[in-house]
């Protein structure tokens, strides 16, 4: 055999061996046995937003009372992970892992429970419900994920149904779950009561509509300072969206903050009840007490103190269930536009977190068009190497709640693009769990502003 034919024969043998090896490798790979559905839920009240992963691939973000999924995955074996990414750290911290052999047409739910220091995963699995599309029913399961709530009876019935002992769908303690129930479509109320005592109502939702051909999960969570109810309640839908239920016995609360420099003190009245002062004698830079709001729209009239006929400002307060809000009066009494006053609601939607403090700063200065906000180590000289935390802050713009390190932090205001401070520095000694709310106000010196803390939790 010539060298030419020897080379050709060797190439053919090599190709055949490669094909055979490839076939063997394919045959040894795991083969998916259908598909299953996976979701992750975060029930740790002091947790920031986490990442839910399949192996190292992100499925979605999961904040407290939030869910990622259901997402469809091949019927193989996977590790599912809850990961935490802290500010200033490059790599995620793995909090908990659950290995699942995903089976065909099974729904898997993983709930992160416990604390961030000692987290664990609670899991259950149920067969997928196959819908024809003609059903007039839906399914709901009920999950108790609140260590502080205690045991409760669950009543879930059509609107107007009075809780009667024996008619509860079940009794739950922390970590318990009631399997899916099949229920007719309609307008429902969720009522939680003390065990065996339907007259002691812990929570009662407003009526909400449930449509057929759908599975939902009703989950109970710990309360936190961002809500008014004694328990957090969310309804989870198959794609991961959530609906928050409010308690009719814990209405939203609203207070006022006077941030309009040059505007006199005000009294606040609801509706046209000028015989009942709701927010009495609120001066510049002052904060009123919280007051319940129960109407879909509550007219609020701000007047000169002691003179209900001297109206300063009028606004309608919209009903937003289960919330805490501060309504801020700001602007100028004699601006370019007649009656140049405005209001801005600030929603208090932050929680104390175990991982870092959070701060919010909102600008209500009318004297200076654009500001820069710095957060630095105390004593830092603002030069060209130091950049603002938030640049270009204009009137009524808020930073939202942002994370910041523990320890001493200094907050300074300058004009946009400049480095000379135009406010006295505010130095805060911050700890994990702190929630700090600040506003920027005008001063008697039109070239200076003041940064003022108006709420700190805890």
Image (spheres, grey):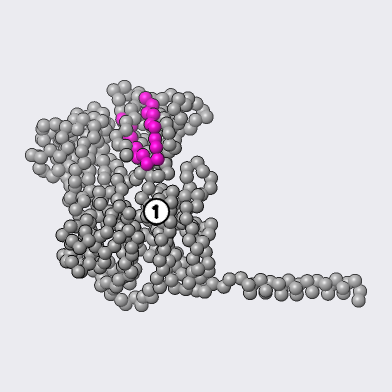
Q: Mark 1 points at which residue?
A: 114
Residue 90: percent from the left, percent from the top? 53, 45
Farthest residue toward the left? Answer: 275
Residue 328: percent from the left, percent from the top? 26, 38
Q: In this view, does 235 lie to the left or right of 278?
A: right
Residue for point 24% across, 32% down: 286
Please give the range of residues in magenta: 424-441
Residue for point 29% across, 34% down: 454
- Is there any visible trace of residue 415 in the rendered image? no
Residue for point 53% across, 47% down: 91
Magenta region includes residue 74: no
Does residue 302 lie above or below 246 as drawn?
A: above
Crowd rating for badge 1 (residues with CA inside 10 Å; few <14, some 14–19, many 20+): some
Residue for point 50% across, 52% down: 94
Q: Nearer the viewer, residue 446 or 210?
A: 210
Does residue 347 lie above or below 37 as drawn?
A: above
């Amino acid at each position: 055999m010539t060298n030419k034919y020897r080379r050709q024969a060797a190439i053919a043998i090599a190709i055949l061996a490669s094909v055979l090896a490839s076939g063997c490798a394919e045959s040894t790979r795991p083969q998916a046995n259908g598909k299953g559905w996976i979701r992750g839920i975060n029930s740790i009240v002091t947790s920031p937003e986490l990442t839910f992963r399949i192996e190292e691939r992100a499925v979605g973000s999961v904040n407290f009372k939030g869910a990622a999924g259901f997402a469809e995955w091949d019927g193989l074996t996977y590790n599912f992970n809850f990961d935490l990414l802290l500010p200033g750290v490059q790599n995620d911290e793995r909090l908990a892992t659950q290995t699942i052999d995903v089976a065909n047409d099974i729904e898997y739910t993983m709930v992160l429970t416990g604390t961030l220091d000692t987290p664990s995963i609670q899991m259950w699995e149920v067969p997928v419900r196959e819908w024809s599309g003609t059903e007039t029913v839906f399914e709901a399961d009920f999950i108790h994920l609140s260590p502080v709530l205690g045991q409760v009876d669950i009543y879930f019935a059509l609107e107007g149904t009075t809780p009667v002992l024996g008619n509860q769908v079940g009794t739950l303690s922390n970590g318990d779950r009631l399997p899916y129930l099949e229920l007719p479509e309609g307008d429902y109320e969720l009522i939680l009561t003390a065990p065996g005592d339907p007259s002691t109502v812990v929570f009662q939702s407003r009526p909400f509509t449930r449509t057929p051909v759908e599975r939902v999960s009703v989950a109970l969570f710990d309360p936190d300072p961002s809500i008014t109810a004694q328990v957090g309640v969310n309804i989870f839908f198959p794609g991961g969206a959530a609906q928050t239920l409010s308690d009719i016995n814990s209405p939203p609360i609203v207070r006022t903050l006077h941030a309009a420099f040059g505007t006199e003190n005000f009294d606040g009245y609801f509706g046209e009840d000028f015989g009942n002062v709701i927010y009495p004698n609120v001066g510049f830079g002052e904060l009123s007490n919280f007051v319940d709001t129960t109407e879909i729209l509550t007219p609020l009239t701000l007047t000169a103190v002691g003179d209900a006929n001297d109206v300063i400002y009028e606004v309608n307060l919209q009903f937003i269930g289960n919330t805490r809000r501060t309504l801020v009066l700001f602007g100028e009494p004699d601006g370019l536009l007649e009656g140049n006053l405005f209001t801005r609601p600030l929603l208090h939607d932050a929680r104390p977190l175990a991982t870092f403090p959070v701060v919010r700063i909102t600008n209500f200065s009318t004297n200076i068009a654009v500001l820069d906000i710095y957060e630095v180590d105390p004593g830092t000289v603002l030069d060209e190497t130091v950049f603002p935390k938030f640049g270009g802050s204009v009137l009524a713009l808020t930073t939202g709640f942002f994370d910041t390190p523990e320890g001493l932090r200094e907050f300074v205001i300058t004009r946009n693009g400049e480095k000379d401070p135009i406010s006295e520095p505010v130095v805060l000694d911050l700890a994990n769990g702190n929630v700090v709310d600040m506003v920027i106000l005008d001063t008697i010196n039109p070239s200076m502003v003041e940064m003022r803390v108006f709420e700190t939790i805890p």
